[in-house]
Amino acid sequence: MKGKRHLTWAVLAAIAGMGFAGEAYAADSVAADSVAAEKAAAKTAQAQEQNVETESGDHDLPDTLVTAQRRRKSDLDTPATTTIITAKDIEKAGYRNAFEAIDQQIGSTSTSYGEAGQDFGFSAGRITLRGYDRGTLVMVNGVPMNLKNYPSTENIPAAMIDRIEIVKGAASTLYGSEAMGGVINIILKKPKAGEEAVKASVTAGNYFKKTEVFFQGDRFMLDVSREWSKDISHSNAFGLDKVSWIDWWVGKGQKNRFGASVALTDELSLNYNYMEGNITRGGIKYKKTGNHLVKTATKYDYRFDDYRHTANLVYQGKKNGIHAVLGYNYRKVDGYDYVERAKVDSNAVLDGEIFDVQKTWKMGADSLILGYSYKREAVDLTKKKESATRTGNALYASYSRQFTPRFNFTLGLRGEWINDPEKDQSVFMPQFQTDYKLNKDTAWYINVGKAFQMPAVDDMFRYRNMNPQGLKPENGWTYETGIKHRHGNDTWKAAVYHMDMKNKLGWAQDAVTHEYYATNKGNFRNTGFEAEYMKRFNDTWSVTVGAGYSNPQVQDPSGRKRDWVQDAGRIEGLVRIDYQKDKWQGNLNLKYLGDREYYKPSSGTAQDIPDKLQLNLNLIYTAGKNDTVTLGVYNLLDRENYSNRYGNLDLPLNFRLTYAHAF
């Protein structure tokens, strides 16, 4: 009955948007000249959209998205909260990788085990949108990167990223499982005819070193890099009044990356990325005695070797409206416990495959997309010698109807049939979107969608003793409305949303064995507001200001009162200043995450997680035609910033100096 109420509210919201748009348009139609002008503008916009959609896949317009509706549209015409990060943005801000670029945006409350998405085996750094942990789908060229429900971008070289599209809100209708809080598509650069370049760079810093060579040709692109991270003697918030009574350290780490992109034809491209890395981590456990911490005999000492492969074959028809992706994602984690002198239990080999094909029909101002998607995910626990495989087949459709020159309505539907090792599932997911042009510069949209997520493919058997009834899939709805305005050099966006999800997955600790295990924590809800304003004053200065407030909560069904408990930070703030003149470029970036959740650790002091305030400065000097020098100074305020609720810390004040030469 409650599911029917959700669907009823979704339909009513869509009808309300249609009704409002119809009334407004009817009132405006009194002025015949105005209507004629609107129709002419609509035809122009339609022609521009068709031109963009028939391109080979390049994004010539800086505000054009492909991810939100599986069709190319301008940001203003996209009925969802969106953010675009370009290659130029990554360079100007000095982001080390895709994780760092995404985490500096409004709506991101990501988890990391150190700087820039640091992993320690399956203690995985992960991108989180709108407070929904393990509920963000990350893709590279449309290929899902999520394995065990954890999105990871570690093997994607920043130098090969053309743009990152962030779409917030439920997106399961178009992309399937795991797009609970949103979807992120990392779109890689493509070789371009007539453009050849070779670029070599060296980076040195007080915690980080890197060498990299990048080559671009007519049909081929290649990136090879190696990076080293320095050891950190105290890598977490440790102390009597701190969240951790384990004094963790991190040893030296190394990562080698290789990336290649080949334009096989004008319509077919092949991309491959590889990473191998290793890092050590350990610590000493303390216990509280009176007003002091006393060292115990418990020690930790681990090494993790990490191997990742990602490959995708992308077809983008120039004239037939067909887009197809064949993708492969692989990860192997091999951890060793030097204290126990044994492999760690969580060692695993993961792999995922996808085949997705869609056909787009243009019918005047309207369009229809029909598609089929096949997914397979497998996990092999190498030490426990257990394995599991999940497959899924899905049919999806998206119909966009231009009712008037001002009003557009999109209906999305998806049916997915999942063959699961524990229990098969059949899922139906609808989505309703409206977009109403208040004028040529301003649009009001409504976005209502259902989301769905299966438990991690190995959670069923790994934690069967703790969950004898099995784990339930997560599902629920997101309701969102917002306004976008773009005029000249000014752009602003604002959105209000509500998330209502069931069977939220999380972690609990067994009272006897003290082992952490996956469980359905309860229902999840989050009501929030996001706003962002961008102003380009002139060719030299531009500024971006953003803010967000939300209330992400989980209701624990095991408690007597069934209390709603805060599950992530509530307040976000963003200030970004960009400068460019003559040979100089500069970026000052401030990101704030406050009013964070309360955490009660098994070994530490229960408390509210401290606010996070990250201030970074990046300066680029073009020394000559082929030479650039970049200085990045990070955590300028030298704050003890928690990168997660468990007390892992971002780096203190640190710098990176890079010299690059183009041949």
Image: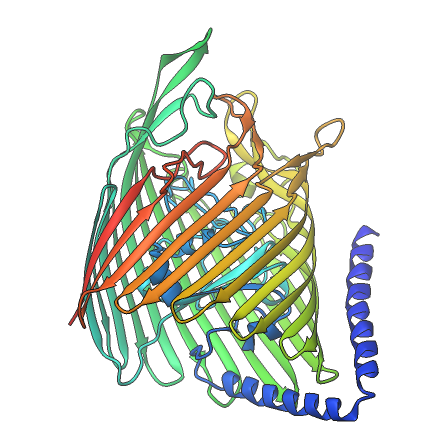
Across and down, in percent, residue 478 comes to: 68, 56
Q: Is residue 156 above or below residue 57?
A: above
> Is residue 69 visible from the viewing direction of this image?
no
Q: Quadrant of residue 194?
A: bottom left
| Left or right of 321 in this view: 305 | left
Task: Pinpoint residue 438: horizontal percent, then vertical percent.
Answer: 71, 75
Q: Nearer the viewer, residue 456 or 462?
A: 456
Quarter of the image for residue 157 reads bottom left
Is 96 or 303 nearer to us in this picture? 96
Residue furthest out toward the top? 290
Q: Is residue 473 left or right of residue 61?
A: right
Residue 97 visible, this angle? yes
Which is nearer the eye, 376 or 36?
Answer: 36
Q: Position of residue 120 (x, y in %)?
A: 37, 40
308 up-or-down from 120: above or below? below
Task: Using residue 508 as the reference point, say whether residue 306 is left or right of it.
Answer: left
Instruction: Tell me how the rendering is colored.
Output: rainbow
Residue 585 position in % (x across, y down): 31, 63
Q: Residue at x 25, y 65 (%)?
A: 223
Residue at the image position 31 percent from the left and 33 percent from the top: 281
Count of numbered labels shown in the rendering: 0
Which residue is pictured at 84% across the width and 52% down the height?
1
Residue at image location 60% in from the left, 50% down from the top: 548
Classify 648 as above or below 137: above
Q: Please tell me which residue lies in front, 289 or 538.
A: 538
Residue 10 placement: quadrant: bottom right
Q: Quadrant of the C terminus?
A: bottom left
